[in-house]
Amino acid sequence: MKILHVISGLGKNAGGTSEVVPRLCRALKDGGETVDILLANKEEEQSDEARLAKMSGVGLIYSRGLWDWKKYFLPNKQCADYAASLVSGYDIAHIHGLWQPPQWYVARACRRLGVPYVMMPHGFLEPERLKISKWKKILVGTLVERKNLNNAVALVSTSESEAAGFKAYGLENSVHIMPIGLDWEKYVPKDETSRSKNGKRRLLYFSRITPVKGLDMLAEAWAKLSDFHGDWELVLAGPDDRGYTEKIEAEFERLSPDGSVKFLGPVYGEEKYKLLHSADAFVLPTRSENWSIAVAEAMASCIPVVCTKGAPWQCLEECDAGYWVDVSVEGIRKGLEKAMSLSDDERIAMGVHGRDWVSKNLGWDGIAKKMISFYEDVLRGVN
C-alpha cells in the first residue's frame, strides 16, 4: 500500500502534530508500507522528526507551491495540475490538520483523481479552538473545509470525545479512533535522585503558552495553594502563542509574588527529557484538548498527573496515575492539593502506574498495525 501523509509543517513551532505524523509514518514504514510525507518547507528537513523519518525510509516531498491562498479560490489550472501530480499514484491520502491551503489542495486533487482520503483534524474542531478567529473559520468552513471533511471517506480522531465533537460540527462520516502514540522507552522513570537543584519539589506545566490551556485558572489555583509554596515550585515550559506568555506571566506574578513560579520558554530534545525527569507532579489545566501528548510524556516519565476534564484522560483515575478534575479553578486546586499532599513513595507508585498504562496502550507498533487495518478497510469500502 502506498500512503501519502499531508501536514503543513514539521518545524518546532508546528506543535505536537509535527511530532505525531513522522512517528506514525515511521511505524507504518516498519509495518511494510510505502509512506511519504508531503510538507511545505524544505528547510524543515533539518528538524529532528523529519531527519528520523528519512532515516527510517519515509519519503519527504516539499510543496511550497501549495501555500497560495489566492490561487485556491481562483481558477488556476497550473496549481490544480501541480497538486494532482503530487497525489497521483497513491492508494490513499491521510490529511492532518485543517484551515491551511496545502490540505485544501490535496483534498481537491484527491477528489479529482478518485484517490480516497481520510482527514484527522488534531483538535482543530474542538469548541475552544473554533472560537479563535471565529468568523474566518465560519467563512472558510463554508467555502472550503466542510466540503473537504464531508467528502473524506473517513475521519480519524484521537479520542471518543473528539469524535463526538465531529458530530457536533455536523459531520456524519465514519470515524476511526487513533490515540497518539509515544516512544515511551525514551523517557527515564522519575526517582528521588532527580530533585530540582533548589531542593524544592517541582510541579511542571509543559505545553504551549496559550489561552486555551487554562493557565489563567492555574494562576488562581496556585495562589490558593500558598501553604505549599515553601516546599514546591511551579515551572512552566513551552513556546509562546502570540505574546500570551508576557500576559500570563504578569498574572502569576500578581497573584503569587513570592518567587514560586518560573517560566522557562520552549524546551526541546534532551533538555525536555531532563526537565520531565526533574518534576514531581505534572499539571495540564486545559479548557479543551483532543489529546495532549504532554500528559503521555509525563506518565511515561513516572510523574503523577493532574489534568482537567477538558482533555480525554479519564484513564488517570482508572489506572491510579493521577487526578482528572473539573475545568475550573476549584477543580484544579483540589487536584493539585491531593497530588502535592502525597508522600514521595505514593507519588512514585502513582507514576509507575502511569508508565505501565502508556507502555500497554501507546506503543507506535500496535497503533500502526491498527491504522494499516483501517486503511485496508477504507480501500475495500471504496473498491
Image (spheres, grey):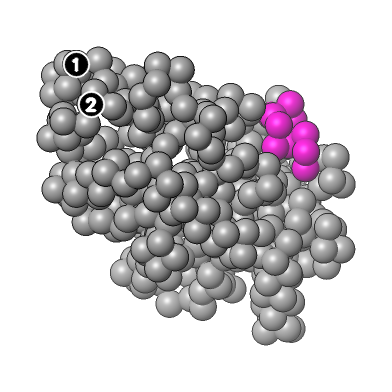
Q: Is residue 356 magenta?
A: no
Q: Earlier in the sequence, mark 1 or mark 2?
A: 2
Q: Quadrant of the N terminus?
A: bottom right
Q: Quadrant of the C terminus?
A: bottom right
Label 2 neighbour load within 10 Å: few <14, some 14-19, many 20+: some
Q: Quadrant of residue 316?
A: bottom left
Q: Secondary structure at mark 1?
A: loop
Residue 239 seen in the figure: no
Q: Nearer the viewer, residue 257 or 311?
A: 257
Query: Residue at image x 53%, y 38%?
Result: 191
Q: Which residues are magenta?
A: 44-53
Q: Main secondary structure of the magenta part?
A: helix
Q: What residue lies at 67% left-to-right and 84% top-to-bottom?
A: 381
Q: Position of residue 234 (x, y in %)?
A: 32, 28
Between residue 188 and residue 341, name the one nearer to us. 341
Binning the other alpha carbons within 10 Å of mark 1 as few (below 14), some (14 to 19) or many (20 upward) gives few
**Residue 282 place in picture, x, y as percent:** 39, 41
In depth, the one of 302 and 102 nearer the eye is 302
User: For residue 243, which quarter of the picture?
Assistant: top left
Q: Is residue 30 left or right of residue 73?
A: right
Residue at the disc numbered 2: 229
- Indicate the amino acid at tag 2: His
Distance CA(mark 1)–CA(mark 2):
8 Å
Q: Are marks 1 and 2 in contact (CB under 8 Å)?
A: yes
Residue 258: give its label.
Answer: 1
Residue at 70 percent across and 37 percent down: it is: 49
Q: Is residue 335 above or below residue 40?
A: below
